[in-house]
Image (tube, rainbow, N blue to C red):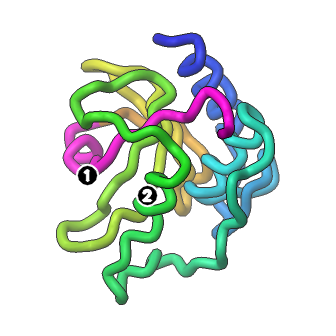
Amino acid sequence: MSGHGKVVIAVARQWIGTPYVHQASSKGAGTDCLGLLRGVWRDVLGNEPEQAPAYSMDWSEPQGEERLWNAAMRHFLKKPLDTEASGDVLLFRMRSGGVAKHLGIAANVGVSGSFVHAYSGHGVVESPLSAPWRRRIVARFQFPKEIN
């Protein structure tokens, strides 16, 4: 694991136990999956690169727009799906034909893989990266080492 990946996952794990609150990004008080990534970004890199617009729970699904994916492409470094590392940002498509609308951060990799994410009804947890979750991954990114 790279030193940078260790820092990212260590910071993400500090959010575990934060309640799920749609559109929030406050460690200990409330967050959603995007808010978790925003908070980790702030702790690791400083100011967020752009203001997150208001968004609905359906993440632009009716319009079929990949808003979350496009934002990830603007700010994170794209990686091949088959090169996993701790600290990677994982983008999930929750149902076939839907837009990608869930994010997590890879913690452990390999057969005992896990990821940290904010999950509706559960808050921020570290979950096993089981086969059903792995099948939903559509993109993998890494945090930049610095802001350009």
Horizontally, residue 110 falls left or right of residue 29, namely: left
Q: Which residues are magenta?
A: 130-148
Q: Which of the labelled discs sits on residue 50, or is there none?
A: none
Cα–Cα span, label 1 and label 2? 10 Å
Which circle's residue, 1 or 2, is located before the other in the chain? 2
- Reading the image, the residue beneath label 2 is 102
Above-or-below relation of 107 to 53: above
Residue at the front extreme?
148
Query: Do labels 1 and 2 touch, CB within 8 Å?
Result: yes
Q: Residues within 10 Å of mark 1 (few under 14, many from 20)?
A: some
Q: Residue at x 69, y 53 (%)?
A: 49
Residue 82 placement (x, y as % from top left): 22, 30
Q: Residue 12 versus residue 41: which sits nearer the camera?
A: 41
User: Hey, which quadrant is residue 127 in on the image?
Assistant: top left
Q: Residue at x 26, y 34 (%)?
A: 80
Q: Amino acid at mark 1?
A: Arg
- Label 2 SS: strand
Q: Is residue 28 above or below residue 16?
A: below
At a point 33% along the width and 25% down the height, the residue shown is 84
Residue 98 left/right relative to 26: left
- Eyeballing the image, is 70 above or below 122? below
Q: Quadrant of residue 9?
A: top right
**Depth check, front residue: 48 or 28:** 48
Query: In percent of the image, x 31 and y 62: which residue is there?
Result: 94
The image's mark for residue 136 is: 1
In the rendered image, the quadrant that contains the C terminus is top right
On whether residue 133 falls in the magenta region, the answer is yes
Q: Amino acid at mark 2?
A: His
Relative image position of residue 6 (x, y in whole percent): 58, 17
Is 145 included in the stretch rendered in magenta? yes
Instruction: Give x and y (percent) for residue 40.
Output: 68, 39
